[in-house]
Amino acid sequence: MKIFLLIITLINVLLLNACATVSNRSATVQEAELLKDRRPHNIIASDTDIETDAYEELNDDKDIKQYCHINVNAYNGAVLLTGEAPTEELKTKIIAVVQVISNVKRVHDHIEIADPSDPTSQSNDKAITKRTKKALTQIKSMHDFDPNTIKVITENSVVYLMGLVQRDEGKVVINVTKLQPGIKQIITVFEYLD
């Protein structure tokens, strides 16, 4: 019996150490990505809060929750709204809800008046986003460029690019994005540093 308890204790210790290693590694990766972000840490936290608050507020409205498909992305206080609302009234309500959230500087409205996109379309959008992000990691022509500084959002095969960039970086990012298959349009929501 003592040997059995000893084995169970040993297994638990090993599992706890393995879990701690994984979460420490994950935290280290997140920390490294944050160091490369051009936004101050308090702005990154504020952007996360904006997105969380927006989703909570929008989900509290039964009509928005039931009839709309909305994505909220915040970057440096600018909010990009994409997705679909079946009526102009619901679209207006969504924008009004987001505009009054703390620390929102401006809202970029790209909500279409339409029924929510289907799962196939949403899956296609995820694939386009993944391909675009991977393509951005291949940019080697700019020495200090970090692809993690670009936020890529895709809705109905339209790619939105957000970030704090130099103008020459923005041009290269747009040109690389144009080469990706399945994209109908590219819309930039960049803030230029120069």
Image (cartoon, grey):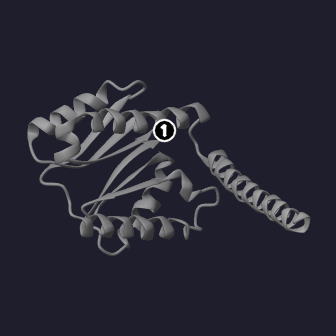
Between 147 and 62, the one lying in front of the other is: 62
- 123, above or below 104, in the image: below
Between 12 and 129, the one lying in front of the other is: 12
Q: Please report the residue visible at 76 percent of the width from the left and 57 percent of the height from the top.
A: 16
Q: Please report the residue visible at 36 percent of the width from the left and 26 percent of the height from the top.
A: 101
Between 153 and 15, the one lying in front of the other is: 15
- Residue placed under numbered mark 1 in the picture: 48
Question: In the rendering, at what x and y percent does residue 50 appear?
Answer: 42, 34
Question: In the rendering, at what x and y percent does residue 163 appear?
Answer: 46, 47
Can you tell which quarter of the image residue 156 is in?
bottom left
Question: In the rendering, at what x and y percent does residue 43 appear?
Answer: 53, 33
Between 6 and 57, the one lying in front of the other is: 6
Q: Which residue, as the protein is rendered here, is positioned at the far front?
A: 1
Q: Please report the residue visible at 80 percent of the width from the left and 58 percent of the height from the top.
A: 17
Report the number of numbered marks. Answer: 1
Q: Residues within 10 Å of mark 1 (few under 14, many from 20)?
A: some
Q: Please report the residue visible at 78 percent of the width from the left and 60 percent of the height from the top.
A: 12
Q: Which residue, as the protein is rendered here, is positioned at the far bottom?
A: 181
Amino acid carrying label 1: it is Thr
